[in-house]
Image (cartoon, rainbow, N blue to C red):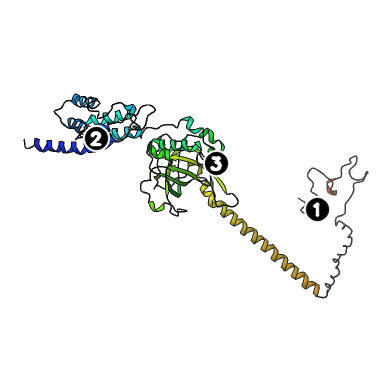
Amino acid sequence: MRHSQPSAFRRATLALCLAALVAPVGLCAAPPLLHEPRPLFNPAAAERAAYPPPLAMAALTFGTTTNHSARPLTTVALLIAGELDQYSAWKLGWRVFGRDERVWIGTTTAVLNSFSRNPFTALATLKAGDHVNCWTLRDTDRFHKIPREWLETARDRKPFNEGHIENEDFARILTLANFTSNNALRKNSRRDLNHTHLSADPAFYRGEVLYFEGHLRRINRLPPPREAARAGVNDQYEAWVFPDTMGSQVYFCVFTEWPAGLSRDLLGQSKIKQNVRVQVAGYFYKLHAYVTNDKNQPTKVAPLLIGHTLTLNTTPPTPPGNAIWFKPLLYGIPAMLVGLIFAVVGVTYWFRRTDRLLLERLRKAQDREFVPPPPDALPVAAPVTPAAPRVPPAKSAIPVRMNLPGRGDRGSDTPSHGEGASGSGDKPPDDVTGA
């Protein structure tokens, strides 16, 4: 008994407190209908009774829900009894409830059923509330494409105008992005699109989810559209992000949740000077026209992306594979230009200096009197050697004897041996040996 009494006391106290919360909801007037109005409770019966039947019936019905010994059919019976004429506590029927009344009743029922020991009671209440349009259950990790009819009113290269139907579709897409997680958007995003694709054919890429990394330059907070606020969107942020690619143009990003880890001191700054790198994933809606301070181009165009939030990026940017060769050229080409300039200046200086020296020499030569050079020496002929006198040939010391016919041996033309005639054993005439 020691444990049952405090438990019963707590249940009774809780029943009275929650009954006091339920009673004003029941006593509020229902919205007028096209035919006969049927209020939720009967005010006349409440005035005649000492204890208002609506309050008493509400407390009694709620007491049966907190009493574990009571059967579930008891609560149903009391609900039906409260509709009878003798009580006239309420009128059952969803057709007498407006949107606000359904939300109040569904929320109160979900809160009361959360005290039940059965964990499936709260889940069943949430599912029933979604069925009767008290609220809408959404799986935030599930990706949803934008319906095509929401994109037909988008106007490229024009700003938003108050009262245009484009604002209603923008509020719908903002609500869709609010109830879609950033992970779901990143998993279904495209990374092969850039500013050139979107500017060339925005209607073809409208509704696609884009992902890129860039530098945050400005972020502001604005009140969300009325349609989005009624659907559960609490905040609307606008950010201007420049991608990491060289020569890129700005993107206009709209999201509903403040980025985790980002300081709120950056709100409202005309230009963020810190190096804040973020990751963006969002629906491409249109090419948004905005006003600038540039006198030559007062109006510019930026792609409008609608997402859930931004993600801080602490990793350094990695250049793409096809841009590795570009880094040496980034320093090589300026160095070559500087070297070429120095070479041209040096060659020009050398030529001008040489011309100046030559002109000075010519000027000095003009100022002097011309002195002819000395005459060249006459050429001297080479000495001629006299010809040698002709010497007659020397006579031989030994006379030559000629063999004439008729001299020598008889009957023979051959000279004899003693006269130096030729023979088989004779010596030449100049041989003095005589051998």
Q: Nearer the viewer, mark 3 or mark 2?
A: 2
Q: Nearer the viewer, residue 161 or 92?
A: 92
Kindly state the secondary structure of the residue where label 3 is placed. loop
Separation of residues labelled 1 and 3 (CA atoms): 142 Å
View extreme (right): residue: 406
- Relative to 368, 108 lies left or right: left
Image quarter in which the N terminus is found:
top left
Q: Residues within 10 Å of mark 2 (few under 14, many from 20)?
A: few
Q: Is residue 325 above or below residue 374?
A: above
Separation of residues labelled 3 and 2 (CA atoms): 60 Å
Q: Nearer the viewer, mark 1 or mark 3?
A: 3
To which residue does mark 2 refer? 47
The quarter of the displayed image where residue 140 is located: top left
Q: Is residue 200 above or below residue 247?
A: above
Q: How many marks?
A: 3
The quarter of the displayed image where residue 10 is located: top left
To which residue does mark 3 refer? 158
Q: Earlier in the sequence, mark 1 or mark 3?
A: 3
Q: Nearer the viewer, mark 1 or mark 2?
A: 2
The quarter of the displayed image where residue 188 is located: top left
Q: Residues within 10 Å of mark 1 (few under 14, many from 20)?
A: few
- Relative to 119, 366 lies left or right: right
